[in-house]
Image (cartoon, helix red, strand yellow):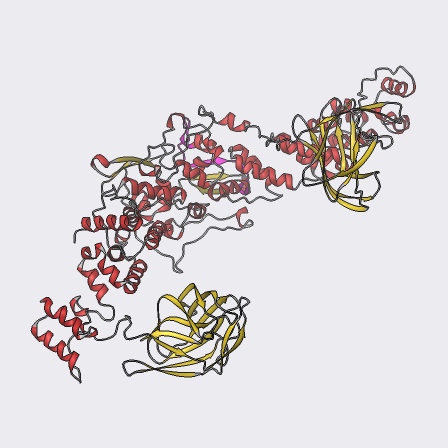
Amino acid sequence: MASGSKNDIVNRLLNIRLDDGGGGDEPPPQNMLPSNQQARQLVQIQEEENGEVSEPPASSAAIENPQPINNTGGRLHNWQATKTTVKDRLSYLFNNEILSDVHFIVGKDASQQVIPAHKFVLSMGSAVFDAMFNGVLATKSDEVELPDVEPAAFLHLLKFLYSDEVQIGPESVMTTLYTAKKYAVAALEEHCVDFLKSNLGTDNAFLLLTQARLFDEPQLAALCLEIIDKNTADALNAEGFTDIDQDTLNAVLERDTLRIREAKIFSAVIRWSEAECIRRQLPVTPSNQRMVLGRAFNAIRFPLMSVKEFAMGPAQSGLLDDREIVQLFLYFTVNPKPNVGFLDAPRCCMTGEELTVNRFPQTDSRWGYCGTTDRIRFTVDQRIFVVGFGLYGSYYGPTEYEVHLQIIHLATKKVCGSNTTTLCCDGTDDTFRAMFKEPVEILPNTSYIASAKLKGTDSYYGTKGLRWVTVDCNNGEKVVFQFSYAADEPPPPQNMLPSNQQARQLVQIQEEDNGEVNEPSSSSAAVENPQPINNTGGRLHNWQATKTTVKERLSFLFNNEILSDVHFIVGKDANQQVIPAHKFVLSVGSAVFDAMFNGVLATKSDEVELPDVEPAAFLHLLKFLYSDEVQIGPESVMTTLYTAKKYAVAALEEHCVDFLKSNLGMDNAFLLLTQARLFDEPQLASLCLEMIDKNTADALNAEGFTDIDQDTLNAVLERMVLGRAFNAIRFPLMSVEEFAMGPAQSGLLDDREIVQLFLYFTVNPKPNVGFLDTPRCCMTGKELTVNRFPQTESRWGYSGPTDRIRFTVDQRIFVVGFGLYGSYFGPTEYEVHLQIIHLATKKVCGSNTTTFCCDGTDDTFRAMFKEPVEILPNTSYIASAKLKGTDSYYGTKGLRRVTVDCNNGEKVVFQFSYAAGNNGTSVEDGQIPAIIFYI
């Protein structure tokens, strides 16, 4: 039969099975091979001795100084077949000579290392590499020297670009961050910064602040400053403080938020100046110390010291001249105070006694809590530090509350301070303290929201509240509070990171009008006939920065002119389509493409004609190679399977076959069997044959049966022995009436064969007729039942476990169901899950979840399988029934051996024994009293 007609059949059968409303619009391929022969013809398969290809090292330790993988001696071995995903394939090529087209000479002197790479992977992961290899001033050399980069850091960068894996540690994070910034790999930068954030503490806050300022990481810098503000003394005493640069020192000393006495700041600055003199190889003298401090010295706020602190320290240090010392002593002792040339604005260190503002003069009851938050808006007229709230407690008596506190900056929605804690009350209408972990700075004339979410019983509440409250301080000053209503508001928006300045310097950013780059269509329908994405006019726009994973970057390049180096002219006539692609991606995904582009007979052309391939199927293949996405449907599955086999993409073949398996039915079993044999898919063929065996009549009556080829027909008919199709028909299994009404009058048998078969039906001993008489699995005779209990009792309970009994028979039978006991309370319906399990292999031979109804008597009631279950002789099986319902009758005085007389004079002997792990059923007592079967 011609292949064209076969595929017309396939289109028709899939329409029948999936009801997609008509024939497919794709003509079938004309040169389908019956196996993976084409791939074997194109590619020399060179397997490793152990059956697997070499893998690059994957551990974090191994990456520090790995040797490149060198498989170029046998580079056409089919390593692609063992890597089923984009990530698997690219990860395998990391630091691997296979397909490499550039070598980096990284580092200098003894640490120098030569690292292989692939220009395509680097170009799609970094706008800087893209410009380096594909820009106007692109390098022509296959060797690139990078003396300023550490080999380990460069390998970390490549590992990320090839596999999305992040391998950084304390010893390499800064060099990796430098390398990521150098090549504008924003996602790796972010991982490095996150690592630094997670390891930030008082002991390294100053050093990380220096690095954050150096690498232009404002978020990390802000976190470092926050740590320094909250733990100033510990941070200044850390070993790394004296190693920071002068600009960082000055930036910290200018802050108003340091929580430490100024005298201690002065002592820390003296230590830094001594270390800086040593670094500059200067004598440690007061004049040199002041010189190296520069403007940082003027940021010390001497007026904030007490006169005693000043006299004991700075006045005797030699860093101040006499005039400055005199002016500062006058500042401490006279009014009005002279101008001393140093700031006297207070830092945030808290002084004086704890103060409280109370806004309610009266209390009442009761105030309930159902999950919402109590909030009040407030402002103050000078800077203060809030350490907690006073809250009302339960009016039922002593109680403990869970409370979540927050202070929120109204304009920015930033949470300035928060804590989840508990407060205990004594049942009075007093207020009870709920404290923050650390003071929260409140700036003057700025709106904040005080928020408390309580979980507990109803409480007292305040009333007659005041909008303005003035608090007298112990130093004679006053703080004025103003309160107003605070409505519930949505959560604050996420802060947006500033754009990468280095990427802007290295790469011309050409954004689209809407601020985003064009994306290829990803819907299943759109892939059938999409137009290629053409961004080559502005190809250096930094699209890489928006694609943070290998899969996102490759998916973006699917059917995209960016970086494309080959065009396929697919199909023919009006259906022809030009599709851009990337040789590297195809070579990585297919040994056939690898041979096409890199083998001994590699094509030199940038255009490849594929007249025998359907454009939609080729796009499905590319979509899979670029993104692991599978887009197949009834109209394209066969052409996609053909294309996957043509290019030896085993994983996509498997998806196509799985699709066909999931849509296998009686109406298309014969047609799919034909295709399974054509494409050398034994598993699919086996499933088709199984479907035909179990539903033979329906399968034979299906529309497509008459279209199958003779070889397929023969394969179906010869179920027990090999032979020609006609000789595989088992005429002796018919009744004499069936034979006389059909085959005897068909003209297909000669007279001698007809005579011999009639003799077979009527005489003994039976003659040899030349046709098999081995029974098939069709069931004959009447339904039979084996009953193993002569008596019944009550009652048998069901709490979840399964009732099981082990059995064997002495000849082949087909079990169709069980007889089960029902409720002794009266008419009831049970839910039951039936199984027959092959004991040796644990294979479930048959199962069904169904219901049965009982009438309250101690009879057995039928629970049936969906289809007969074949039971082989002298083989142990477990009959299993899991019931859900009320207590039932059960059998007792059970028999271990039962013989059943059959209607043909034969006997079937059942043997029963205990099956462990059940609800109590045994040979002597329990459920499953009857097995219903045919022979």
Percent of width and height locating residue 395: 80, 42
- In the displayed structure, does residue 492 sit left or right of residue 90? right
> Which residue is at 40% across, 57% downward?
52
Say which of 392 and 535 sits in front. Answer: 392
Percent of width and height locating residue 51: 39, 59
Q: Is residue 145 magenta?
A: yes
- In the displayed structure, does residue 46 sit left or right of residue 196? left
Q: Residue furthest left?
A: 751
Say whether residue 918 is visible.
Answer: no
Q: Quadrant of the C terminus?
A: bottom left
Say whether residue 533 is visible.
Answer: yes
Say which of 566 and 888 sits in front. Answer: 888
The quarter of the displayed image where residue 266 is located: top right
Percent of width and height locating residue 232: 76, 34
- In the displayed structure, does residue 641 sit left or right of residue 573? right
Q: Does the magenta stretch include residue 715?
A: no
Say which of 361 and 74 sits in front. Answer: 361
Q: Which region of the structure is painted magenta?
A: 133-152
The quarter of the displayed image where residue 199 is located: top right
Percent of width and height locating residue 93: 43, 46
Q: Quadrant of the N terminus?
A: bottom left
